[in-house]
Image (tube, rainbow, N blue to C red):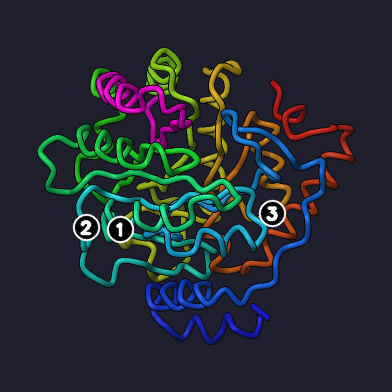
Amino acid sequence: MFGILRPLLFKFDPETAHNLTIAALRTGLLPRSPADDPILATSLAGLALPNPIGLAAGFDKDVMVPDAALRLGFGFVECGSVTPRPQDGNPRPRLFRLAQDKAVINRFGFNNLGMEHAIARLKARAGRPGIVGINLGANKDSDDRASDYVTGITAAAHLASYVTVNISSPNTPGLRALQDGAALADLVARVMAARGDTGVPLFVKVAPDQEDADYRVITRTLIDGGVDGLIVSNTTITRPPLASRHAHEAGGLSGAPLKPLAQAALERFAAEAGGQLPLIAVGGIASGADAYARIRAGASAVQLYSALVYEGPGLVRRIKADLAALLRRDGFASIAEAAAR
């Protein structure tokens, strides 16, 4: 079906096509994905996942279709990024398909309807099954961005399955500075204090564009601060060789060209963490083999988004089937066993 619809969707500009996809999912007219192969069941920071394939933040910014995404077969869904106050983001056009490269460039700038709307949506699905996390951002004009994350955690801790502190978007000027040394330590202390005794797992999402010394500093800061997991990685501001006419658009690059950089970043963080910090891999994952490579490199789970643009929702089922086959081929009984370093 996607093979028929894709040429039609690609006639629209990318952001319009995305909005049409969200509208279609909101109808609820979706067949439920078959039950997962038991070998794919795993846990992440205490969360029981039916499978380790997650929908990355950015697809469902305003918590509009998390249950529809779960019906597609994802093991968990991450909504957002959400900022305390509603934000328009950057001017359009701000999303570009690089079809020749199976890539996407975006410079959205945390466009979203704000935390109050997201919380209302989370309340509306309270009691439903499925792991639904919330990805937090900071308002562009905020005087204290760490305070924005505290606001988000305070609001979402009792409703979201987990909370991600996104300090790695390249489209909010200065945001990535929160990944640095003392700024990161201060942020972690503040968000952990805000979490309090709620017990909600707290993850941090970082960029793939790190200096050599950053891997150790970031990893040690998160472990010492008690953070529950690290998401590796967001989009890249680097530009490997690309064929598309949109190659030089400003923004974060995702999709196939990000794969080697995200894989390398995961391997570096895994080496530094030594099993002390759960890792969630994202960036260029488009097949069961891609997911398996990240798991063998130490990831407890993976996320994807850009590949859906080119492969459609059936990709989730294919990845799970191929991943289960690869686990059995190599004699592993579980995701956790394959991820152990």
Residue depicted at x 55% and y 60%: 67
Q: Residue 234, position in %: x, y?
A: 42, 44
In the rendered structure, which disc, 1 or 2, sits on the residue that comes first in sequence?
A: 2
x then y, percent, for residue 7: 56, 84
Residue type pointed to by label 3: Ser
Q: Are marks 1 and 3 in contact (CB under 8 Å)?
A: no
Which residue was labeled with disc 3?
Answer: 287
* Residue at 58% in and 69% down: 310
| Neighbours of disc 2 within 10 Å: few (<14), some (14-19), many (20+) | some
- Mark 3 residue element: loop
Q: Is residue 269 left or right of residue 121?
A: right
Q: Which label lies toward us, 1 or 2?
A: 1
Tell which circle, 1 or 3, labels the residue nearer the N-terminal end.
Answer: 1
Residue at (66, 41) in percent of width and height: 49
Q: Quadrant of the N terminus?
A: bottom right
> The disc labelled 1 sits on which kind of residue?
His
Q: Are marks 1 and 2 in contact (CB under 8 Å)?
A: yes
Look at the image and tell me in which quarter the C terminus lies. top right
Q: Earlier in the sequence, mark 2 or mark 3?
A: 2
Q: Cα distance, mark 1 to mark 3?
A: 34 Å
Q: Residue at x 69, y 72 (%)?
A: 31
Query: Which segment did they paint magenta?
Result: 185-213
Q: Residues within 10 Å of mark 1 (few under 14, many from 20)?
A: some
Q: Residue furthest front?
A: 127
Q: Disc 2 marks which residue?
A: 86
The location of residue 182, given as percent across then percent down, is: 24, 18
User: Dot 1 corresponds to which residue?
Assistant: 117
Q: Secondary structure at mark 1?
A: helix
- Few, some or many residues within 10 Å of mark 3 (<14, 14–19, 20+): many
